[in-house]
Image (spheres, rainbow, N blue to C red):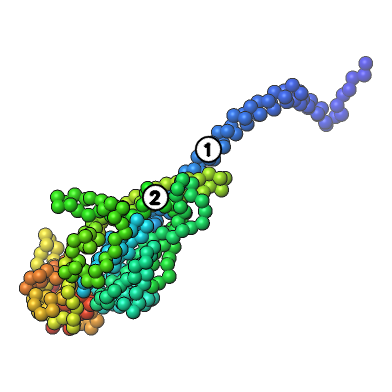
Amino acid sequence: MTRLQARPGRTAPPLRRGFTIIEMLIAMSVTLVVIAVAAPLYRAQTQAVNTTAGRTDATRSATFATDAIEQDLRNTGVGVFDGQPLIVRAAVDAVSFNANMVTARESDLVAVFFDPDADSTALGSLTTSSAVMLPNSSSTYPSATYNSNAETISYYTVSDTGASPIPGGQMVRLVRRVNRMPEEIIARNMIRTPTQPLFHYFRRSSMGALVEIPPASLPMFHNVPRHGAAADTGAVAVIDSIAVVRVNLIAMYRDARGGTIIDTVRRSIRIANQGLLQRAQCGEAPLSPGAPTLANILIATQKAVRITWSSSADELTGERDVEMYAVYRRVFGVTDWGEPLANVPGGGTAIQSHIDNSVFAFTRYEYAITAIDCTPAPSAITPLASILVP
């Protein structure tokens, strides 16, 4: 027998062993079993992730819309004077109200926001010559012209495309309109149902408890031109007593794989300015208040300046239209007053005061005051007074 020998300097190649057919079949069977077990779990996990993401999207859409409504509605009545109603119309699918939300004038210290580039169409109160049809109604507003900078804001639903997944429901989009401006879409894929109105309204009972105004009695429209007039009483004035508006938004998310997810967001919004006394008329710019008197004081260990001044004659007598006082401060030697240091509401007293606790030691400050009426128009600035903070 011939014996094979490796050549000098070379090693014999290693023996090569592979899988047998049986081993391969076993391995494939195990792999298929693992896939068969894992696939449903993967599909279930993917579906759960999609469901969570869809619910999050639906909730986010409804929450964004609710935040937008709350930001405006909670400021109802800001800057409203001269008999202008706070809530104009209350319906299950629409609400219209007055508020001075935006101004383009630096002298308008009542507005919630200042925007020098704001469209003039969206600023100030509507007049009889610029009356509009209130959304989802046949009511025209206003029937009187108000000496006010408060614009009319409406939130309401408009029919949208698509089928509602809720029986008897209707797909809608939520929109916002200011005065005569084009409507702005706030949210889509909302659902309106007969049993779940978008808006619920509550008034306070004689015991202070919140009582819902029956949806069957809606819509309500402030059809008396002047709020607080002799005719604005009884059943006509129910809309004036609305203290809380509850928003009920049903949002839908349609999954690309065919699933539909629904979520509901509810929020109660308090009408903080409801019931406040409104001025009867804004006339000429108010008379200046008295010149400020200054005094150094300590609040705990912090240095501060107390500013005291006599009220404008137009707050307690005369036109009685002073709403607030603007307090100005500047460092001695500076010529520009800049923006007001503070706005102090008229307190109905002969003497007003404000404490400035943002002063620095060894600095001389100058202070001045203006009175602001419900136009709002400022009075002439008072003679200034100065003080050195020790």
| Residue 56 visible in the displayed image | no
Residue assigned mark 1: 45
Above or below residue 153? Residue 318 is below
Label 2 amino acid? Answer: Pro
Q: Amino acid at mark 1?
A: Gln
Residue underneath mark 2: 194
Q: Is residue 85 visible?
A: yes
Q: Is residue 265 left or right of residue 304?
A: right
- Which image quarter holds the C terminus? bottom left
| Quarter of the figure with the N terminus | top right
Mark 1 or mark 2: which is in front? Answer: 2
> What residue lies at 16% left-to-right and 69% top-to-bottom?
230
- Looking at the image, residue 34 lies above or below residue 252: above
Give residue 344's position: percent from left, percent from top: 17, 70
Name the residue furthest left: 350
Q: What residue is shown at x 18% (from left), y 61% (from top)? A: 234
In front of the other: 355 or 302: 355
